[in-house]
Image: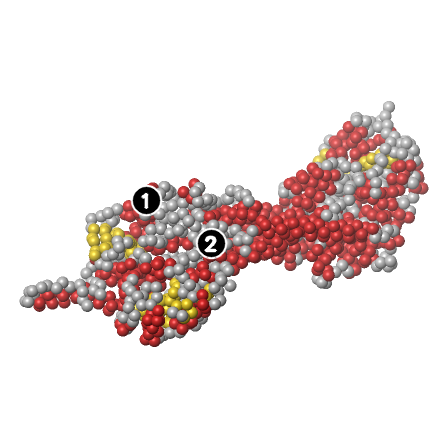
Amino acid sequence: MSTKLEQAVHALKEQIDAPVASFLSSCVHCGMCAQACLFHTETGDPKYTPILKVEPLRRVWQQEYTFWGRMKKMFGLAKPITDEFLAEWEELVYDSCTMCGRCSMVCPVGNDITYMIRKTREGMAVSGHVPDGLVGATTRAVTIGSPMGVKFVALEAQIRHVEKDYGYKVPVDVEGADYLCMLSSMEIMNFPEYIGAIAKIFDHADVSWTLSSKAFEATNSGIQIGVSDIAAELVQRIVSEAERLKVKCVISPECGHAYTAIRWEGPNLAGKKFGFKVRHILEVLDELRQEGRLKTEGMKDNRLTYHDPCQIGRRGGVLEQPRNLINMVASDFVEMPDAGKMNWCCGAGGGVSTNERADEIRLKSFQRKKEQLEAVQAETLVSACSNCRIHIEDGLEAYHMDIPVISLTETLAEHLVDKE
Amino acid sequence: MTNEAFAQFNIQIGDDLTRNVQPLLHEIRHGLKNLLETGATSVIDLRSIPLAPGEEAKLIERLGHGEVTVELDALGLSEIYETQYRGVWLVTHFNDDENIVGRFIEITLIPEILKAQQEDMQDSLQQLEEELASGDDAEEIKTGGEVN
Amino acid sequence: MTELEFLSWVRGPGFQIATVIFVFGIIVRLLEIFLLGRKANLAEANGSEMSGGMRAIFSRMAPESDTMKRSMFTIVAGYIFHIGLFIVIFLFAPHILFFSDVIGFSWGALPTPVVDMTSVITMITLAAVLLHRIKDPVMKYLTKTQDYLVWLVTFLPLLTGYLAFHRVGLPAPSLLALHILSVELLMVLFPFTKLMHAFTFVLSRWYNGAISGYKGVRS
Amino acid sequence: MKKHSTGARLSSSDDTLGAALRRQGVSRRSFLKFCAATASMMALPPTMVPAIAKALESAKRPSVIWLSFQECTGCTESLTRAHTATVESLIFDSISLDYHHTLQAAAGHGAEAAREEAMKENFGKYLLVVDGSIPVADPGYSTIAGISNLDMLMDTAKGAAAIIPVGTCAAYGGIPHADPNPTGAVSVADLIKDKPIINVPGCPPIPVVITGVLTHFLTFGTLPELDDLGRPRAFYGQSIHDRCYRRPFYDKGQFAETFDDEGAKKGWCLYKLGCKGPTSYNACATTKWNDGTSFPIEAGHPCLGCSEPEFWDGGGFYKALSIPTTEVARDALYAGAAAVAAGSALGMMNRARSKQAKSEHEKVSVDDLQKED
């Protein structure tokens, strides 16, 4: 068994491909990515410059995949990759990066830095230099089935509550249903209203759907910590259930990285194309809207704005759908500056919220969101990611702001016309 | 080379080529003003200026020809004349083969070279005296020039 | 070595050496990058890789408004000196002569005073860029020795070219030789430094645009 | 140019130039004219005329020995065709040209005896003019009266007050020195390090430049101010390009592309046709040739840079200065082909390494994430 350091270098070596080599060859050290990163803009600390965070990956690339780097390494001129070096980078790679992808949008030479951070984490994870919070969450996800340690019995209890409160049936393990609806533990534990909203909307639109007792957890700690093997295992649970229940489509819940995990990384982790579609709940709802299957009544008339969760918008491609849906139920919808694909991250994605050590910087970087909200004097904030919601609520409290943060799906459900 | 010669070889002289004429005329104006105000003379050596084909001819044309023209026979011909601008002289030295060996614009009351020189006058005086002295013999008059 | 021998060397063997290293180095590096390849994406596409990639190659020239605001100096100065370099390198008559000799065709030159002025603006901008690199906390933190080296080898051809054109300080053959030598230095260092971005930026932008384009995002 | 019989004027070498001229019946006025022409010739301002007159009056008549080695006699031709014949002849009449084997009547041992006599009489005071380069690969390549050029130069140089290599061959090796230089031709300055040397390069030099330099030495008895290549700054201080009347076209970017295009007819800049004006220092653009008629660029031909060292090997007379002298396209093509091979090999190696790394992948489980090693 090789040492953790050797494993780390090996893992990084596996990750390097043509895009990485191209990106690392192109960087001109212009510093523009720093201006796109809220960890830098809100702290002013240059060490948070995004491109620097991929230094471990860069060194491995240079020493393993470039002729001159190999020469330098041979003559002992290359900067070594040591345990201390990786230890120093742990905070940069995990605590101060949410993989929001904003830096990838501004790089003048076109470097997708986020793409490289994701890969860098593959090495960091096995090196042992990884936040305890993430290790814990990942361990729980694999052993218990959910990063928060939520078991099906807990979900069952919530389902019962919801069925009682909302009066709709919540189908579980229904074979042949069109949609398999995934949830995040946060929704189960913090926002069970989401389950009620789904039940109400799908009943309203006559959608055939189900939950699965074996795979209800959509989040994927393997992606956040950066272990593809674990991520693949977690994805595989969903794939197996989707195949067992013969659904046509798997719905990713109001969670950012879950969407990336199952929609974009999923097939690549599983090593095959899926026999079913994967859609975000907002995509499904917008499809229903287009088909005229959603009938709403009443409008929210307070000033409402939408926070684009990074993994759903910028990194996911779901940008228009939420706006279409909001316009059905809000009369005073305003966009924050930089909304859409250039939106600023809430500051808690990419595993940062799971990492208690990062609490301080997470709240500090929230200033960015605060300024965005103040710029439009929003009275209500709507979003589509439980993780964003929890952190934004946390941040608003810390900055003594009183803006309710609501779920788009839930808001839509509230405005549905009662079925005759 | 004259402008006619250029025309003969189908060489075109654009107006934009002749950039030296105007500045030179300005320099001459300065020199003339200076001469009037302080009495200081000045000389422009046309050979030290990178003139484009036809520029010298153009300058001379602009200067025109005034009242005084002098020919000098000293180691070849020299042609000196006052231009239409009084006090501005064009001095051209030729050698025996009638090639120009120097061309100057002098701004002065009278070009230095026209004045009789001390040494020459002394020589002449001596020569005249000798001639008068030998005039008594009166056979043959030897003309000066060859001193040795 | 007399200065004309020096000039002969830089125009002859020196340029040969520089050309070989330049061309060889760049092609090797591009192949090193390109041949690494990447995995096929198995996820269902929500857009076109190709159009996203092609789009990004050009769209990255127009920064978003927030980026513009936050990195105003870098962007504006970057624009000026890149365009300046382009004009000075490719639109100066003697340079075009060089290119037409090498590649067999030529194009129109800009009037020399325009190029002259451009080179001054470019040098001033590069000086400002250097100052920014030294002063700005992020730039300072990012900067490695190579960044200064690359700055220098980019600046030197401009400076020596300017001096050679105006014939300042040294006899003309020496100035011309120094100018060509500085260009050779640039060519030799090119494949081993971040100067490679002049070629790889196309690849990088394409990959970036393709990754996003596949997901239906215009990056 | 007078042909001198051997040693005829050696006795009068102590005369001053002023006395010599007066003896010839040159009037003061003629002398002033001569001085004005001389100042112009030496590229000195007209205000220097009185000083020149004064200096010339008291200048001593030096003895001059002229040695011709590997040369084409073009330099001598240039000098004897000097258009200011009268003025120059004045100077040459007043110098004591004691040895010039091309021009002198005597030949063979008689001539050599004259040289030796002149050397002995004026040891340490005579001017040595040299045209042609000196072969050192084998002294037998060029001999005069059985004496090799090298020996003759070294011998004659010993007693010289100063040496004036005339023409590019003597100054820098010139055409005999051009690649592959079969005779091992070298310049005077390559061989002699302990004497003042005033190079008067050009192929040939402008006649008045030759006489101008001689006159300067004669007039002031000092060496003129020299540039790095040992040339008098008065004549070689500025490049052809700097003094070229076609310079405005260069600045405007208007170039003749061929010898018969519209640009050529309009007299545009000849840079693209290979003009070496920017790197060549000479007085052609102002002094001009043939009675001040014209100079090569005025005649529509690019400057060859004949007053510069290595001008013959400078990479083609018709190749623009900014173009490398070697075949860059060919080099680039070869380098490119080699790079495709090498790059493919390295690229495939990279690929293999990446593949190998993936194949050696050890599956990571949650146990591996625990902190204990």
**What's the chain of the residue with tag 1?**
B
The way the protein has been coloured in the rendering is secondary structure
**What's the chain of the residue with tag 2?**
C
Nearest to viewer (mark 2 / mark 1): 1
Could you say where residue B101 lies in the image, as x and y percent from the top left?
29, 56
Could you say where residue A165 lies in the image, as x and y percent from the top left?
90, 34
Which residue is nearer to you in this view: D229 or A327?
Answer: D229
User: Mark 1 highlights which residue?
Assistant: B5
In-image side of A355 versus C111 (left or right): right
Amino acid at circle 2: His
Q: Secondary structure at mark 1?
A: helix
Using the image, tell me which numbered label, if any, was put on residue C166.
2
Q: Residues within 10 Å of mark 1 (few under 14, many from 20)?
A: few
Q: Is residue A187 visible?
A: no
Q: Secondary structure at mark 2?
A: helix
Which residue is nearer to you in this view: C83 or B127?
Answer: B127
Residue D160 versus residue D343 in the image, above or below: below
Quadrant (top left, top right, bottom left, bottom right) of the C terminus of chain C? top right
Residue A275 versus residue D157 in the image, above or below: above
Identify the residue at horizontal 78%, vertical 58% (top origin): A87
In-image side of C95 versus D146 (left or right): right
